[in-house]
Amino acid sequence: MALGIVSGLVTGGTPGGGVVLTAALAALGLAPQAVIATDAAISLVVGLVKVATFQALGELPLEAWVFALVIGLIAIPGVMTARWLSARMSVQLHTALLDAAILAGGAVLALRGFGWM
C-alpha cells in the first residue's frame, strides 16, 4: 500500500514520475516481463481514472480525446516490442537498462528543476 501511495504522489505530481514505479516493481524482484505488464496495468487504471475525473470536471475537450487516442494507439507497438525484448534478455541486463533510464530521467528532471535545460 505504501508503494501505491508514494507512486501515486510522484506520478501525479511530476512528469515522468512513472519511472519510480518501474524501479520499485523491479526492486520487488519481478521478472522483466512482469514489470512491464504490471506497470502497463497500473498505468491503464490510473489513466482511466484521470480521464474520468477530467471529463467530469469539463476539462477534457474533444481535441484532447483524439490526441490521447492517437498516442495510446501508437504506444501499443512500443509495449509489445518491450515485452518481446525483455523475454530475450537477462534479468541483469534488464535491471541495468532500467537503472540507466532512471538515472537519465532523474538527471533531466533535476536539470529542468534548476532551469539548466
Image (cartoon, rainbow, N blue to C red):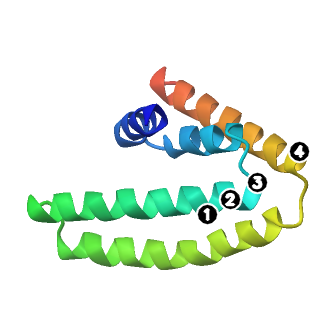
Q: Which sits earlier in the primary sequence, circle 4 or circle 3? A: 3
Q: Secondary structure at mark 4?
A: helix
**Mark in front: 4 vs 2:** 2
Residue at the top extreme of this rendering: 114
Q: Which sits earlier in the primary sequence, circle 4 or circle 2? A: 2
- In the drawing, what numbered circle is on residue 31? 3
Quadrant location of residue 32? bottom right
**Mark in front: 4 vs 3:** 3
Q: Does 60 sit above or below residue 20?
A: below
Mark 4 and mark 2: span between their CA atoms? 15 Å
> In the image, residue 97 lies at what x, y percent?
79, 46
Amino acid carrying label 1: it is: Ala
What residue sits 47% from the left and 57% below the top?
A: 42
Q: Does 28 sit above or below residue 113?
A: below
- Callouts 1 and 3 close, C-beta under 8 Å: no
What residue sits 46% from the left and 72% below the top?
A: 71
Amino acid carrying label 4: it is: Gln
**Residue corresponding to mark 1:** 37
Amino acid carrying label 2: it is: Ala
Q: Secondary structure at mark 2?
A: helix
Is 117 left or right of 86, judged from the image as shown? left
- In the drawing, what numbered circle is on residue 34? 2
Q: Which sits earlier in the primary sequence, circle 1 or circle 3? A: 3
Mark 2 and mark 3: span between their CA atoms? 5 Å
- Callouts 2 and 1 close, C-beta under 8 Å: yes
How many residues crowd around disc 4 within 10 Å: few (fewer than 14), some, or many (20 or more)? few
Mark 1 and mark 4: span between their CA atoms? 18 Å
Residue sitting nearer the eye, 86 or 30: 30
Quadrant location of residue 53? bottom left
> In the image, residue 60 lies at what x, y percent?
18, 65
- Callouts 2 and 3 close, C-beta under 8 Å: yes
